[in-house]
Image (cartoon, coloured by chain):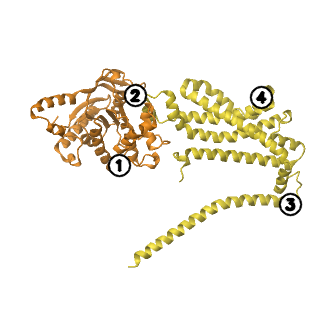
Amino acid sequence: MGAPDDEAEAGTSARGRRAGEVARARLVGIILPIAVFAGAIGLWEFIVRVNGIEPYVLPAPSVVIATLAKDWGTLSLSLLVTLRTMAIALVLATVGGVLIAVIFAQSRLIERSLYPFAVILQVTPIVAIAPLLLVYLNSGTAILVCAFIVAFFPILSNTTLGLASTDPNLRNLFKLYGAGPWRELVLLRAPSALPYFLGGLRIAGGLALIGAVVAEIAAGSAGQGSGLAYRIVESGYRLNIPRMFAALLLISLTGILVYAVLALVSHLLLRRWHESALDR
Amino acid sequence: MSSSALPLSRSSRPPGDRALLDAEEAKIEAAPLVTLAGVSKKYQNGVAALAGLDLCVRTGDFLSLLGPSGCGKSTALRLIAGLEPATSGTIEWAGGQASGRPSIGFVFQDPTLMPWASVESNVFLPLRLEGWSFRTASERIEEALALVGLPDFRKAMPRELSGGMKMRVSIARALVTRPSLLLMDEPFAALDEITRFKLNDDLMRLKQEMNCTVIFVTHSIYESAYLSTRIAVMAARPGRIIAEIGLDAALPRKEHFRRESAYLDACARAADALHGAMDAKDHM
């Protein structure tokens, strides 16, 4: 009568082995990308050292980090300026984009009349608009407006799409129980549109940074600008290549941080119910 | 109405009053709740969904609108619910025109739950829209969920439930206002047959407990014959009623009703009416 027990044991150990394999695969999935990234940085350092490349041509990663530490006083102030521009632009784009999307949702006619403006702003490259804005506005405001323009559209278009995608039968239900348009908006259409809005917000976060950087570069020496992109232009004029890299590194890190924060917000808001955020 | 359908409680009354009570109850039973006269619905794209629909729904009826897809049965339901206006004709309620419309519960073909809200929030919705606070509604929510057999799922999210359970939540949401008229638009069409049979039995029990009138849209002859006290058979293009079939057996019915002659007879008559309408169309 030992056979079933043996089988059960065999089953348990097989399951244990499989669990071990899954854990190992997951570990490899984390370690491998980190190793590849570290390898690439190491290769860069190696090539620069072996070939004796001068830092004003291509600085080694170690030099970039050293510069970042040395110039932290200047660079951190610039980082704050860029972060501030980006954050204000993102908030304004969110408020404006959602507000206009709600107005669009009230009437097709309003949407059709105003949408062309939004599209024109979106398809015209921001680099081409920036110089014009710098003529009309002081450089700080112009940079903010540029970042706003690029961040605004994904929020507007996604939220508009979300508000229009409400389950028609749920709308019928609201009508049946005599709910007015305001309650329908708050209780039904807003939550329906939330996943779409958050998708737009994630795109807008990255674009706000790009908009701010592009506008700072367009403003260049004309502005009394002190953002990270301005530091890059300035360091370029002075052939301070390590500092260019250090500023670039900070911009990349900012972009990654913004994306991670918005992805986390999105996950926290949707994890209980939306397909996109469920654990599979 | 057959005597077997009458409530048992009357047996305690003096025998002399019986005839009178019977007559009175029959009158109450027969009181029309809503009458549709010559109702037509033409959509903007020119499709005539309904043409000259005449239908009288009496208080206490379990009325099935039976017909093939596209015969306008869902449209008729939406007109009765007031979700759309009729193009012509009148819909008159017991208490006078549209103002006399009683409280209505509506169940759609899909559960149409709000995926972001818990089961209790979904069931709370109709009361919330009527201005109730969650605290005062809590008992009603519990009652509605108990009625559909899901008392332990208040905090669950819709995605955690099976198709049949979602439909139960949807029914609880329709019942939470204690409606006197329940409108159901092919509620069980997407469910597997075993789940559907179970929900059919539960629905008949609910109807008796809630003491409400039901208008039930279905394309299943068997489902309509099993559930209804009256079947209105509809034909398409244009949507109209081609036959009415009465079933006297009392609700709730049990599984053995499917083998009784009244059930089989109703199925046969409904099938004949539907085939007749189809043949007539083929000859056109």
Write down the chain letter for disc 3.
A
Secondary structure, mark 3, is: helix
The answer to which of B147 and A93 lies nearer the viewer is: B147
The Cα atoms of the two marked residues, 1 and 2, are separated by 29 Å
**Chain that appears yellow:** A
Rendered image: mark on residue A133: 4
- Residue A181 place in picture, x, y as percent: 50, 27
Residue drawn at x 87%, y 51% as measured from the top left: A57
Which numbered disc, 1 or 2, marks the residue that appears first in the sequence?
2
The amino acid type of the residue labelled 2 equals: Leu
The Cα atoms of the two marked residues, 4 and 3, are separated by 45 Å
Asked whether disc 4 touches disc 3, contact meaning CB atoms under 8 Å apart, the reply is no
The Cα atoms of the two marked residues, 4 and 2, are separated by 51 Å
- Residue B284 place in picture, x, y as percent: 28, 30
The amino acid type of the residue labelled 3 equals: Arg
Identify the residue under disc 2.
B83
Q: Are marks 4 and 1 on the same chain?
A: no
Identify the residue under disc 3.
A49
Residue drawn at x 36%, y 25% as measured from the top left: B41
